[in-house]
Image: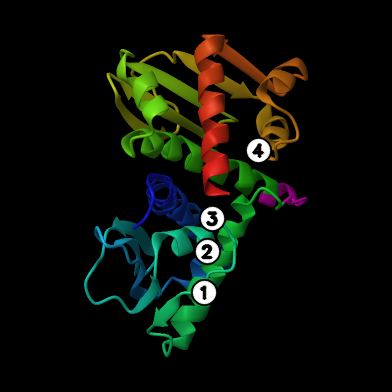
C-alpha cells in the first residue's frame, strides 16, 4: 500500500507536472508539429490495494488535456506495479513500467520525446540557450504554483494548517509581462492560476528581475534572502508569509526529487 508521502508526490506529478506539457506543445514548434495530427489517449496507471492511481494524456489534433484518474480504452498504458515505482520513474530513477500498446511504435516514440522534454524541470538540467532558460523558468513557476495548491489539497498537515486560518489572499509571482502565476488562498482552500490576478491586490508579490533574475533561484544557486540582496528578487508584502511560501516550495521540490 502506498504511503501518504508517495500518494502526495504522485498527486503533484499527475496534477501539476504533467499539465505543463501543454506549454511545451504550444511553444515548441517541433513538438507542436509532431502532435498536430495525433488523436490518442496515453494512460499512466499505478496499482494500489486501496485503488489505482493515474492520469491520462489526451491528444486531439493539436489540443491537449490531462484527465485525472483511470480512463477507458487508452491507446497506450504505462502500468506500474506500485505508486512508489511510478513516482520513481517521474523523478528520473530506474523504474520500468509495463507498456500496453507498445506496438503503436510511432505514437510511443512521440510520447517518449514529450516525456523527455519534461527533463528540463529536473534540478540538474541547466540550459544555456536563452529560449530554453526562459522555458525552464516559465514551466517551473507554472508547475510550482499548481503544486502548492495540490500540496494543500493533498492534505499536508503543515500546509493545511497554514492555509486554514487565512482570509482571501493572493500570492503572486511575476517574472515579466509573459511569465506570471499566482496562488489564491481562502479559508483553507487554494487555487492556482497563470498570469496576473487582477481582482485583488497581492498579499505577497514576488517580483523577479526578468528571466536572468529568476534563473538562479530556479537552479537553487541562491536562496530567496540572497536573491533579494543581489537584486534578483523584490518581495512586496509580508516577508514572513513570503518566507512561508518559499519554505513550502523547497519541501515540494524535496518531495518530488
Residue most extreme to the left: 72
Q: Residue under label 4, please give it.
A: 218
Residue most extreme to the front: 1
Q: Residue under label 3, please give it.
A: 27
Q: CA distance from mark 3 to mark 4?
A: 20 Å
Tell which of 80 and 163 is nearer to you: 80
If you read the primary sequence from the N terminus, does the residue marked by circle 4 or circle 1 appear first? 1
| Rendered residue at 51%/29% (across/down) | 248
Q: Secondary structure at mark 4?
A: helix
Q: Secondary structure at mark 3?
A: helix
Q: CA distance from mark 4 to mark 1?
A: 29 Å
Which of the labelled discs sits on residue 89, or is there none?
A: 2
Which of the labelled discs sits on residue 96, or is there none?
A: 1
Q: Position of residue 107 (x, y in %)?
A: 44, 80
Name the image quarter holding residue 53.
bottom left
Magenta segment: 126-132
| Rendered residue at 33%/60% (across/down) | 55
| Rendered residue at 50%/38% (across/down) | 144
Which of the labelled discs sits on residue 239, or is there none?
A: none
| Rendered residue at 47%/32% (across/down) | 181
Mark 2 and mark 1 residues within 8 Å of each other at the beta carbon: yes
Amino acid at each position: 500500500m502506498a504511503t501518504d508521502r508517495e500518494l502526495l508526490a504522485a498527486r503533484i506529478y499527475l496534477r501539476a507536472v504533467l499539465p505543463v506539457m501543454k506549454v511545451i506543445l504550444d511553444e515548441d514548434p517541433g513538438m507542436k508539429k509532431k502532435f498536430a495530427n495525433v488523436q490518442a489517449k496515453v494512460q499512466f496507471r499505478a496499482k494500489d490495494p486501496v485503488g489505482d492511481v493515474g492520469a491520462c494524456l489526451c491528444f486531439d489534433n493539436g489540443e491537449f488535456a490531462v484527465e485525472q484518474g483511470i480512463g477507458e480504452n487508452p491507446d497506450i498504458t504505462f502500468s506500474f506495479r506500485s505508486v512508489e515505482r511510478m513516482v520513481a520513474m517521474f523523478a528520473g530513477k530506474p523504474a520500468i513500467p509495463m507498456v500496453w500498446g507498445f506496438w503503436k511504435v510511432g505514437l510511443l516514440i512521440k510520447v517518449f520525446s514529450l516525456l523527455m522534454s519534461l527533463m528540463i524541470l529536473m534540478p540538474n538540467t541547466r540550459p544555456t540557450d536563452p529560449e530554453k532558460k526562459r522555458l525552464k523558468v516559465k514551466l517551473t513557476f507554472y508547475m510550482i504554483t499548481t503544486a502548492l495548491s495540490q500540496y494543500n489539497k493533498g492534505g499536508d498537515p503543515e500546509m493545511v494548517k497554514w492555509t486554514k486560518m487565512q482570509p482571501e489572499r493572493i500570492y503572486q509571482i511575476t517574472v515579466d509581462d509573459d511569465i506570471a502565476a499566482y496562488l489564491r488562498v481562502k479559508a483553507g482552500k487554494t487555487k492556482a492560476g497563470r498570469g496576473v490576478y487582477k481582482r485583488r491586490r497581492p498579499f505577497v508579490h514576488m517580483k523577479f528581475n526578468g528571466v536572468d533574475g529568476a534563473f538562479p533561484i530556479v537552479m537553487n544557486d541562491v536562496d530567496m534572502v540572497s536573491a533579494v540582496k543581489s537584486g534578483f528578487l523584490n518581495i512586496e508584502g509580508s516577508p514572513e508569509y513570503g518566507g512561508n511560501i518559499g519554505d513550502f516550495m523547497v519541501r515540494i521540490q524535496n518531495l518530488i526529487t
